Amino acid sequence: MNELDPEKKKQVIGLYGEMQLAMALHEKGWQVHRAYIDEGIDFTITKLWCPKCNKYSDQYIRNDDYKGNNRKCVTNLCKHCKKTELNVVPRYLQVKTSEGIETSESDIRSFSFHPKIRYDMGNDVFYVWIAVFNNETINDRICHFYIFNTKDVSLFDDVSIDTYQITDNQKTTLKINTDGKV
């Protein structure tokens, strides 16, 4: 197989990380919506919430007789209490994926994180930073997901320096071992 040029490889790794994240979120019951045009928010994810039961819920699917036939009807009611209308809970995700660079220690890689959203966008906007550990084949890739609110960027990046707000080249580097510990 031919080696991909570095820019193309970066795009492939980014797409790989995003698809792994989408599958992991779907397994946890989130609906994953991808933007047609990527302008900062990569995914909008939603889940249904029952305010009466105080928990996430699927929609109640009711079976009713209609013109002599049993018909399935999807409602906007809680699957558990079957009475309360569900609320849609949205979250917005900016996703960053990095393969990392090998270090002198065999189980540690140095990962760069490049935040595009450099300011607090509120409680519903999150970064998902994906560290991909690549063994020999794509089947051996291991993803670690690090999720934090946009306001938390300032905990590990100095957002006050002048160049931070005017350049796209400001990056943070963290060392992560194969168990996912930063």
Image (cartoon, rainbow, N blue to C red):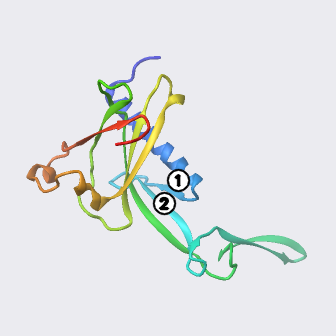
Where residue 31 sits, quadrant-wise, is: bottom right
Q: Residues within 10 Å of mark 1 (few under 14, many from 20)?
A: some
Q: Tell me how far mark 2 sits from mark 1, CA to CA.
A: 8 Å
- Element at label 2: strand
Q: Which mark is residue 100?
A: none
Q: Give the vertical position of 49 relative to 176 (above or below).
A: below
Which residue occupies the foreground of this view, 63 or 47? 47
125 or 142, which lies in front? 142
Which x, y percent locates residue 84? 63, 82
Q: Are marks 2 and 1 in contact (CB under 8 Å)?
A: yes
* Quadrant showing the C terminus: top left
Residue 60 visible in rendering:
yes
Secondary structure, mark 1, is: helix
Task: Indicate the position of residue 44 as horizontal and vertical percent values.
Answer: 45, 59
Q: Which residue is mark 2?
A: 45
Q: Is residue 76 visible?
A: no
Identify the residue shown where x is 51% and y is 64%. 46
Residue position marked by numbered label 1 in the rendering: 25
Amino acid type assigned to the residue bearing label 2 in the image? Ile
Instruction: From the viewer's perspective, tell me whether residue 76 is left or right of residue 130.
Output: right
Task: Report x, y in % for residue 22.
Answer: 51, 49
